Every structure is written in C-alpha cells, then in structure tokens.
Image: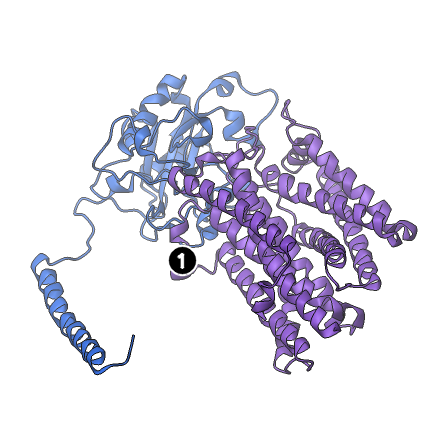
Amino acid sequence: MERTRRNILKLFGISALGVSVKPVFNAFASEAGHLTGYRMEKGKNALKARQWAMVIDTRQFHSPDDLKPLIDACHQAHNVPDFENKNHEIKWIWEEEYHHAFPNKTTQFLNEAVEHRPFMVLCNHCENPPCCRACPTKATFKRKSDGIVMMDFHRCIGCRFCMAACPFGSRSFNFRDPRPGIPRLNRKFPTRTRGVVEKCNFCAERLAVGKMPYCVEASNGALAFGDLYDPDSTVRQLLKENYTIRRKQGLGTEPSVYYIV
Amino acid sequence: MLELAIKGSKKYYGWVTALLLIIGIGFLVYLKQLNVGLGITGMSRDVTWGFYIANFTFLVGVAAGGVMVVLPYYLHDYKAFGRITILGEFLAIAAVIMCVTFILVDLGQPMRVFNVFIYFSPRSVLFWDTIVLNGYLFLNLLVGWNVLEAERNGVHYRAWLKPFIYLSIPWAVSIHTVTAYLYCGLPGRGFWMTAILAPRFLASAFAAGPAFLILLCMIVRKTTDFDPGKEQIQSLAKIVAYAICINVFFFLCEVFVAFYSNIPEHMVHLKYLYAGLNGHTLLVPWMWASLIFMGIGIVLLVNPVTRKNESVLIVACIVIFIGTYIDKGLGMISGGFVPNPLHHINEYWPTLPEAMIALAVWALGLLVLTVLFKIAIGVKEEVQA
C-alpha cells in the first residue's frame, strides 16, 4: 500500500474501531455470564467411585443370544454404526471365545462349557492404561475422579497410536463417516466424525445421572458394577467370594474388568 | 543460491514436471481420502498402521543414514567425505520432509495436527518424535545451507555453526531411536517388544541410507560435471557392508530369542511373516525375497573384488535398498499387527489409492531432493570452474 496521508488516516480509523470493539464485546460477554450463572458441578444423583470396576459372571451366559441384548443396548444408545465391511467395524462391546479373550491363559483340553461360552469383552478401563500414555494430545485420558478411560472425540487427531498401544483390541477407528451406518439415532448421545478413535466409556453419561451402564442394566444381574476401592461394594463382595481372572494380567495394565469363569 | 535451482536443462525440467504430475495426481487422491476417510486404504480395525507409517519408518532411517557421511568428516576429519557431506545432509532433508508428510496423510483428522503442540504430552513417544524429526530437519537445513554458502564464497563456514554440526550427529541417532520407541514400548505387541528394535532400525538405516546415497552419487556423476569421487563411493560401500551385516545379525538374534525361548507371543509374528499362519501367507514371498536380497547384498559388498567393481556395486546397493525397504516397509509394521492381540488373523495389503498417495509423497521427496541436489551441484560446479 502506498504511504499517502489518505491511507494512513484510513489505517488509524480502522485501528480505532478495533480498539473500541473490544470493551463492548467484553461487556456483552460478562453480562451473558452473569445471566446464566454458568458453573460446573456434579449431578445430585451422580454415582461416585475411586475406580469403577465390572465383574462379569460368565457362567450366566450360555449362547450368543444371552449377550446380544447387552451389546444392542450399548451400541444403540451410543450411536455405534453397523458396517458390513469388517475392516471398518466399530464395536464397544462384543463377543469372543475363551481362546481369543484369554489367549495367554488357554489350554488344549479346556472345560467344554467354558470353551463354548460367549465371553463379553470391552475396554478394561485399566488402572495403568497404555493407550493414555501413547496419546500425543491427551484426547484419551484417565479421568481422575473415577478412573474411567475417556475419549475426547473433538481433540483426537486420529493417529491411532492408542490402538497400537491397547493390548486388548478394545478401540475402534472411524475409517469413514459413521452416521450413515447408525440404524437408529439416539439424539441424547453424540455421533462421531470420520477419522477419530472411539471405545466403551463405561457409560460415563449414565453414571453422571445416577444410572448404571446399559450393559449392566440389560444383564439381569450377570454383570456387577461398582467401586473397586469400596470394600462394601458389590464388585468387592463378588471378588471376595469368587475366583476371578482378568485379561492379560501379566502386562501390568491392571484391567478393571473381572471375569468369574 | 536458490537461483541455481531454476537454471536447468530440458531433461531437468522434464524430470521436475514428471514429479509434479505424480504429486498432482496423488494430491487429488488425497482429497478423496480427506473426504471419505482412511477407509479408502487397506487398513483395518486390526491393522491400524499400514503403508504410510511403514514408509515413514523406513524414511526416518534414510534420513538418519545421512549422518554416515557427516560423522566421519566432522568427527574423524576424514577429508574425502567433505566432498559429499552436503549430499548426505540434503538427502536427510528430503527424507525428513517425506516422513512428516507420511505422518500427515496417515492422520484421521489432519486439520487438528497442531493439537500435538497445544496439548503437549511428554509421556507420548509420538510427541517426542515430532520434536526430534522437526529438530533434525532444522539442523540439516541450517548446517547444509550455511556450509554450502561458505563453499560457494570460498571461505570457511562460520564458527558458530560447529556446535550445530556436532549436535546433528547424536540427533540423527535420536530420530531413529525415538521412532523405534514408538513401537517397542507397547505392551501386548510381542513382535516389536524387543530392546534390540532401535539398534536394528539404526543398522538397517545405516545400510539403506548410504546405499541410496551411493546410487545418487552415481546418478550425479552421470548427469552432471561433478564427480563425487571413487574413494568416497568406496568408503560409503564399506559402511553399507558393515551395516547390512549387523542388520541381518540383529534379525538372527531376534529369531534365536523368539524360537529358543519358545514363547508363542514372540514366535507367532515371525511365523506369520516367514512361514504363514493358518494359511495366511500374503507376506511370506516378500519376506524371503527381502532376506535373499540382503544376503546377495552382503556377498557382493563384503567381497572386495565385487565391491570395487562399480557396476556390481550398483546392483548391490539396489538389492540392499529393496531388501531393507521390504523388511521395514512391508514386514515390520503390519507384521506386528498380525495376528491381533486377540489372536485373530486379519491380513493387510495397501490399496491402489493408498499406493498412489504414497507414491506422491515419494515424488514430493524426490522433488525436494532434486532441487536441493541441483543447488549443491551447481555450487560444486561453480567452485570447480
């Protein structure tokens, strides 16, 4: 731009306008803040725990039909898409055979009932989660208040380091837009965009309003959910009374999902 | 010095145009990937890193390999390499640019990439990889450019540059070490969980990088008035010979540990790669080809008669480059994902769009390399004249 008197005056004019806009903007912003009285608070009915944990009584599951209602309840409520292509599959909860759920605890001559039993697998919400260590943006993080391994879908850059880090294959990546694959949209839970990772969130949105996770609710008592560090919780009672195993205990991730076999 | 890059022969412009064309086509395919998602690649829920990350890993090695001419010259005062250090540094720049581009095209949400800096997470190895790669790019640009400019002006480079030159040497080691740490610190991935992964990466890097540099020197000698020199090429060949032997030795160490210990989680990936698993044998011919190529390379380079014959040397460098490329580019990454942590087998093979995008990234790197080499050799020719 040529440095004429006219241009310099213009520049001053624009700058003055800019300076005057800021206080006006601030005034509006602060007024809006006063009106709503916005602040963050836990819900009155919110369920609290130091570390949420789940105990799965696998003896109560005999066929895939016993697991299906749990999976459906979760996937429908969380807007999990249903894709034909196995490569692009998204799953929060799914069924595995014992050999695959516990590949390092398997044996050639396995109890027949156990061998054919459907095992429900999901994110273990580990106490030392390797996925959170791997994430370069803290888009996946261990929530301090209750130990849930959470995902921020808006921060995730889609590098999939967490998926390489998870020793349980619990994470799914949106290889394409998930919305067309959602059978019935639940408007109370966010849908995801392509290019981000997702997984089970232990129904954090339900715990916040005092409800148990969908799968627990649909399980007719086969699943117990509670605070691992509360000696009186149902999960602790079950752990005291039953011998339980966890997936890949040897890796030191300390899974919070326990299985009664 | 940039003006040297725009004064070229018809052949030079033809080559640059061809590269631009490949980049353009790849860019269009990338726009499709942006629009549709990474679903257009061969990656899956089980194999979540594929061709992009494999190329990235290989190219970090090529970049680190550049240090093999810098170190003997600056630390051991091996004068002969003074003639070609700039080629090593410029090769490193082009390779790092390819690495960063490969990471970018691999991201599901590339527009959010700056989150890595906004929410910086020192516990993530990927964060450190971003730091060391960009740092290495900066160091090589700084050192390469200033040393070349000094050479053009017929003066010694400035003294303040020396610390940066020394820093660039361990830094080269760091980029490939951190890249190996991306993989070897992950619980439940038996194939990568080995302390020898970083050394193995470095060994294959110091073979592939200098082998590529030898081939580049041959091309430079043929197409320009500047001769990188017989002694220089022979010294590089010896470095490649040692490095490729160490690389294969490290691989055999892995095989011994996995199979003598007989631990299934460590054996299963090697079995998948070299023998196939439950009828899944997609990579088996490739992995054996890689081993055979590296074997031929060793025979040709260790034997002084064949090494000193430059036509044979070209063949040796080509087989070593291809052999290490298959090893890292196809086997190392997808091999670690198959079978998956639940012992399901889901194989991976890149799709055509994926390959086209990868090709375009290579073309971009070659374009950067061409321009940088054009400048460097232009200066060398000026000084000669």
Q: Residue at point 52% right, 28% down? A: A100
**Colour that chain B carries in the picture:** purple
Left/right of residue B288 with respect to residue B149 in the rendered view: right
Left/right of residue A189 with respect to residue B217 in the rendered view: left
In front here: A94 or A117?
A94
Q: Residue at point 18% right, 72% down? A: A18
The relative height of residue B114 versus residue B322 in the rendered view (above or below) is below
> Where residue B139 sits: x, y (%)?
58, 69
Residue A142 is at least partly visible in this image: yes
Residue B178 is at least partly visible in this image: no
Per the image, the residue denoted by label 1 is B114
Q: Which chain is blue?
A: A
> Where residue B157 sits: x, y (%)?
66, 80
Chain ID, mark 1: B
Residue farthest to the right, as pictured: B305
- Rendered image quadrant of residue B273: top right
Question: Which element is circle 1 on?
Answer: loop
The relative height of residue B297 versus residue B279 in the rendered view (above or below) is below
- Rendered image quadrant of residue B84: bottom right
In front here: B182 or A236?
B182
> Where residue B17 sits: x, y (%)?
56, 50
Crowding around mark 1 (Cα neighbors within 10 Å: few <14, some 14 to 19, many 20+) is few
In front here: B370 or B307?
B370
In front here: B29 or B225?
B225
Q: Residue at point 60% right, 63% down? A: B7
Left/right of residue B114 with respect to residue A217 in the rendered view: right
> Where residue A90 sits: x, y (%)?
39, 32
* Amino acid type at image mark 1: Phe
**Quarter of the C terminus of chain B within the rendering:** bottom right
